[in-house]
Amino acid sequence: MDSKIMDVLKDRVLELGPAPDTSGAYRHFKLTRDADGIAWLLFDRADASANTLSAVVLEEFDQVLNALEAQRPTGIVVRSAKTSGFIAGADVNEFRGASDPLEVETQIGRAHAVIDRFEALKIPTVAVIHGFCLGGGLEVALACQMRIAIDGARFGFPEVMLGLHPGLGGTARFTHLVNPMQAMPLMLTGKTIDARKAKAIGLVDAVTEERHVRNAARDAVFGKLKRAKPSGLIPIMNFSPVRGILASRMVAEASKAAPREHYPAPYALIELWEKHGGDRAAMLNAEKASFARLVVTATAQNLIRVFFLREQMKKLAGDGNVGIKHVHVIGAGAMGGDIAAWCAHQDMRVTLADMKPEPIAGAMKRAADLYSKIIRKRTEQRDTLDRLIPDMDGEGVRNADLIIEAVSEKLELKQKVYAGIEVRMKPDAILATNTSSIPLQELCTTLARPERLLGLHFFNPVSRLQLVEVVSHDGVDQEMLKKATAFVGAIDRLPLPVKSSPGFLVNRALTPYMLEAMMLMEEKVDKETIDAAAEQFGMPMGPIELADQVGLDICLAVGDMLRSKFGDLLPPTPAWLREKVNKGEFGKKTGRGFYTWRDGKAEKSSSAVATARPTQEMIDRLVLPMSNVCVACLREGIVDNPDVVDGAMIFGTGYAPFRGGPLNYARTRGTENITATLRTLAAKFGDRFAPDAGWETFK
């Protein structure tokens, strides 16, 4: 969840009805009754900062229902006592390692019985929702007769991100309350909506402020609340012939984003609705079996693993209290400008310096475009832009807590920049370089205080890719390193601690992938077939298109640098790549590279892929070197945790998430199979495929 929303919620005083008795009968719930006879049921999961639904919690909820049926209050208000939000969804831990669909179905059946029983109460039930209301939390809210949202609440079904669909009755309740043409896309994409949008589609009956909660709840219970009217289109949309037509459209839409063989969940959800959308009871029942079948798939288990990898990497940042308030960025090019814009979006004061005014102007315009897409309120967009300060004279250096250098990848240029700023920096300021390729030892040689230089290597596009490599060297000040790692967490990014070494982890693993693709082109394989091979494996885009995105000039520079260190462990750089770069054909940023780019998209012909199908050997040539390099980096001690390596490749490069990362893929396929395949490729194509010695000890 957005850390800024969390901060705002910290100060929130919630209206929770009468003060509960401290000797409460329940561990996760508090039950009180007000003067109007309304029961206030507060969900407050023990030993947790956010509410999630587990088997134990739902069992206790069932006991609470016994009490409510016996007490017969005039109404029930369901509310979270956590300032962070209503309910964040199911406890994902309970799905980890699931392998028997029948066992899962039994578990889900028990949970369904509790929610069904709650829905069937003959007492007016009202959910009062603040903060986030996601997944299983939204399913609990849907089982209430009325829903009141506090302004700023967010609603969504993120299950699809875990390779699942809603499993607590949400598929049926949501499509019968809200027009399926609005309900289904929300479940299929995992997107969230705010309270106003939820009111507009009929998901909530009212939006109010915290101070009006008591009155709103009373009005709801006593029938004075103006209820949301379900759309007259719902029965028509759920009518079977119409469902068939709409479902086939949804399948076509889903296949653009997620191939069925890799991501079965969206298709299972569409099929569930297409078969049972007209019969709520049948759909509720069928949902259990469908959900259980999905949980045990390799896709869901790997995506659940990725969910925990993200949590693990967040923890690496520490507590997030970093003392960095002012960031000064030097170099307003694509990377520097976007890093500055992101830091300003995360409540930092940012000064942005460059030798020329044009790059700064371009960066300010890109920042304004970004904010208009990701910040809803105009006033907040303006406030964020106000925190991003153009600084032609570079005066921001004097007061900055952190200086990020993002000038081009030339050692002498970077050292010249350091010479100009080191004397003006605050004594406790951190100097970070965004270099993607130059070892920090080389950058340190001219510094008076090399201990305060470290690497913060962001990935492009900064606003979308969550990873930041935090690069250390032998002489670095450990306290500054700790502070920089916490800073990465504070700007809502995931830190990967790496030791300085050519290409660090991600670029060193990604370069052979892109250069091997160029070797295939050298062998006269069509570029679209090569890209299709990677996409068939599950990469978000092929290596040729990726090279164009990154910039062929950067690919060439990183390739040359890594080849100078690792020699024939890397594919050679084709001569025609140099020619392209010399002609100024850098890819997307110049409109022409391997592809021609129009409106930010690569122009492709559909016929080329149809004529030449990618082979398994082609896929192996592209993806196995990534696993091989990851094992080498572990062996060399550049990174020390195989799980975090997988996380880094997923969050930094978009490596097929449903495969769980390059090391997890190797484990799943079998290390013997991987090393044997690499030896076969080495015999045929050369030593760059030789399996690394690290495979012998890899578990």
Image (cartoon, grey):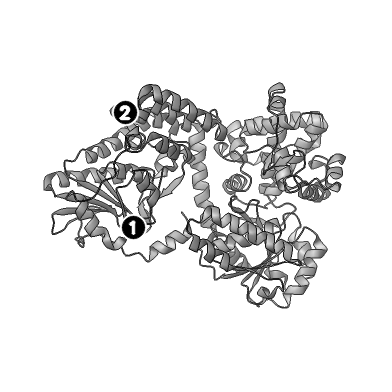
Image location (x, y in percent) of residue 559? 79, 47
Location of residue 673 with respect to 386 vertically, above or below: above
Q: Residues within 10 Å of mark 1 (few under 14, many from 20)?
A: many
Image location (x, y in percent) of residue 235? 32, 30
Q: Nearer the viewer, residue 51 or 27?
A: 51
Location of residue 474 with respect to 171 vertically, above or below: below
Q: Is residue 159 left or right of residue 595?
A: left
Q: Which residue, given by chain and number where applicable, does mark 1 sit on?
A: 82
Q: Nearer the viewer, residue 502 or 164?
A: 164
Q: Which tag, 2 or 1, sits closer to the chain's start?
A: 1
Q: Is residue 223 left or right of residue 639?
A: left
Q: Residues within 10 Å of mark 2 (few under 14, many from 20)?
A: some
- Residue 158 in sight here: yes
Image location (x, y in percent) of residue 20? 21, 60
Res. 432 image quadrant: bottom right
Q: Which residue, given by chain and number where applicable, does mark 2 sit on?
A: 285
Q: CA distance from mark 2 to mark 1?
A: 32 Å
Image location (x, y in percent) of residue 209? 32, 60
**Callout 2: SS:** helix
- Residue 472 in sight here: no
Residue 374, disc: none
In which quadrant of the rendered image does the C terminus lie? Answer: top right
Please name the residue shown 46% across and 42% down the image.
190
Q: Is residue 650 left or right of residue 284?
A: right
Residue type beneath disc 1: Lys
Residue type beneath disc 2: Asn
Please name the residue shown 44% across and 29% down the image.
270
Q: Are marks 2 and 1 in contact (CB under 8 Å)?
A: no
Res. 139 image quadrant: top left
Please name the residue shown 78% across and 32% down the image.
520
**Callout 1: SS:** loop
